Image: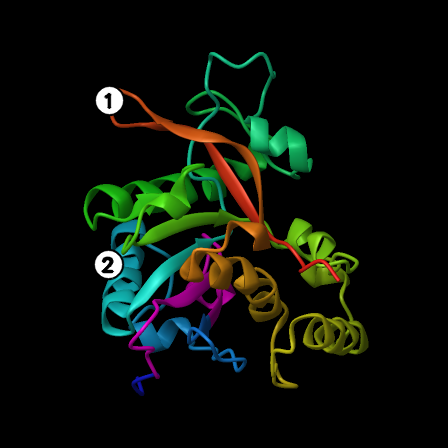
């Protein structure tokens, strides 16, 4: 694939609107730090096709991030399971706060059950990137740590809201005219130069990019954290964690 621009001063940002059934369903948005023109590589540009395999996906993402000097990788999916020590039933604390459609329960349990494939895929992807490729899960004191590579859980449906916009309807319910409307509104809110032919998945990956920018520049005032610090068990499983959303600057 063509080499993309890289900032010599700050890490760049890569956002994935995650899908577990087909690589082509993954929306990918890449942003050079300090720029306003997101780029939209396809899974095929990563050498990925067919049914997603978590090891291959992790390897391809890490390779891209190393080549393009990405310091913040945003994934739209759970990073861990529910902790048995919280008093919230059936879900993680961050999911309760943001009322996510999928609920990640104790290890191996999700609601609704149809989400199990996607949730397990996401958690395994986070695990491999953290353990095999040494990415760091975001913690509350993240801005006190310099020169880290952060892997961050995002939630596009809530990112629209924290940017002061209505959430984009689901892909099956979004007409081309609606997609154009939401693209224009996101362009106004972020000043991003978003191409007319952006897909639904790519637009969902784009809306969380401002949170990645804030993390890359070490600015905690431009993000909203929901949840609690991730807990790593003796077995190496991750429990809980933060979902990060962009925050508009105060006028």
The mark found on residue 235 in the picture is: 1
- Residue range highlighted in magenta: 5-29
Q: Is residue 27 visible?
A: yes
Q: Secondary structure at mark 2?
A: helix
- On screen, residue 52 versus residue 89, left or right, reads left
The mark found on residue 59 in the picture is: 2
- On screen, residue 121 versus residue 243, left or right, reads left
Taking the spot 54% from the left edge, 27% from the top edge, the residue there is 92
Q: Look at the image and say whether residue 10 sits in the magenta stretch.
A: yes
Taking the spot 51% from the left edge, 64% from the top edge, the residue there is 25
Q: Quadrant of the C terminus?
A: bottom right
Taking the spot 35% from the left edge, 51% from the top edge, the residue there is 150
Dividing the picture into quadrants, the one containing residue 36 is bottom right
Q: Is residue 138 visible?
A: no
Outermost residue toward the left in this view: 132
Q: Secondary structure at mark 1?
A: loop
């Amino acid at each position: 694939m063509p080499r993309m621009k890289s900032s010599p001063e700050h890490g760049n940002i890569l956002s994935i609107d995650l899908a577990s059934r087909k690589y082509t369903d993954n929306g990918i948005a890449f942003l050079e730090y300090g720029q306003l023109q997101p780029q939209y590589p396809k899974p095929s540009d990563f050498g990925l096709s067919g049914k997603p395999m978590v090891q291959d996906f992790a390897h391809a993402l890490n390779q891209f991030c190393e080549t393009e000097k990405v310091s913040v990788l945003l994934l739209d999916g759970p990073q861990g399971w529910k902790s048995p020590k919280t008093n919230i039933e059936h879900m993680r604390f961050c999911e309760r706060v943001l009322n996510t459609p999928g609920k990640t329960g104790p290890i191996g349990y999700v609601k609704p059950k149809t989400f199990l494939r996607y949730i397990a895929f996401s958690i395994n992807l986070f695990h491999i990137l953290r353990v095999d490729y040494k990415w760091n899960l975001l913690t509350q004191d993240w801005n006190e740590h310099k020169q880290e590579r952060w892997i961050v859980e995002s939630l596009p449906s809530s990112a629209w809201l924290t940017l002061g916009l209505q959430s984009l309807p689901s892909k099956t319910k979004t007409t081309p005219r609606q997609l154009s409307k939401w693209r224009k509104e996101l362009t106004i809110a972020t000043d991003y130069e978003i191409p007319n032919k952006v897909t639904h998945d790519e637009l969902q990956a784009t809306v969380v990019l401002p949170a990645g920018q804030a993390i890359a520049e070490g600015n905690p005032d431009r993000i909203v954290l929901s949840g609690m610090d991730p807990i790593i068990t003796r077995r190496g499983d991750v429990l809980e964690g933060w979902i990060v959303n962009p925050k508009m600057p105060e006028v």
